[in-house]
Amino acid sequence: MSEAQVSIGIRTGINISDVKFADKNINKVFKDFTNKRISVNDGIIFETYIFQNMALQQELIFSPKGYKYSESLAKGYHKYWYLQFNSTAKFENNIDLSNKYYILIAPYFAYWLRGVMYYKDYKNVQTFKEKIKFSYQINNYGEITEYKYNRFEYGFLIAAGLKHEMDNEDNIFLEIRYEHGFNNNGILNIDATINKVFSINCGYLF
């Protein structure tokens, strides 16, 4: 592969997402009840080689995140959908003439498109489902009466994968990836969560 060669590709994968509560006490309580959300991510890739085995890879991905929870009295979920931009450094090493393994490290930035909360209380037989609002209101007592969530998320990712170069110099790849957010999703204790995502992805580079 020549230097400064540019490739464009598509990718898809399975997200296995969860959250970490910023409040340590809440995290201890909820970690036994939270379950992972499984969803599908899709995106496009722009890759530019600056050296023979090093490339800069930009990705624009539609990435669902969030979590589920379940315990003896209630169950529910928080589902989030993000448009995420990754600007990665990709380091490769040869296995043989047609195959390579690689690692990716990068910061990421994501814009929260929409979210949905669902809750069902078995004891009181109460159920609600509503869209997440990105603003908040304060009553006359100075109390927040609506949740506030952060539209923007930033974090760090690391990935490892295998790439196969075909006879026409197109590439297919398979990788595993872990992403960890740095900022909280919300401002209230129960909503001050940090996204965590493990994913298995594949793609095609032209």
Image (cartoon, helix red, strand yellow):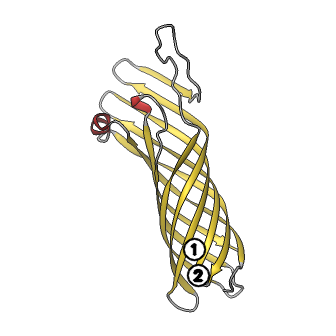
Q: Is residue 53 above or below residue 103?
A: below
**Of marks 2 and 1, which one's residue comes earlier in the chain?**
2
**Residue at x-position 68% and y-position 88%:** 167
**Residue at x-position 53% and y-position 76%:** 91
| Separation of marks 2 and 1 at Cα, in angstroms | 6 Å
Q: Is residue 59 left or right of residue 67?
A: right
Element under label 1? strand
Q: Is residue 111 above or below residue 47?
A: above
Q: Is residue 68 left or right of residue 9?
A: left
Quarter of the figure with the C terminus: bottom right
Q: Is residue 62 left or right of residue 183?
A: right
**Residue at x-position 49% and y-position 56%:** 156
Task: Tell me the kind of residue under disc 1.
Answer: Phe
Q: Could you say where residue 15 lies in the image, as x and y percent from the top left?
A: 50, 54
Circle 2 is placed at which residue position? 164
Q: Is residue 91 above or below residue 182?
A: below
Element under label 2? strand
Q: Could you say where residue 155 lies in the image, as x and y percent from the top left?
A: 50, 52
Label for residue 173? Answer: 1
Q: Are marks 2 and 1 in contact (CB under 8 Å)?
A: yes
Q: Is residue 147 left or right of residue 122?
A: right
Q: Could you say where residue 186 lies in the image, as x and y percent from the top left?
A: 48, 33
Q: Exactly how many numbered labels are in the figure? A: 2
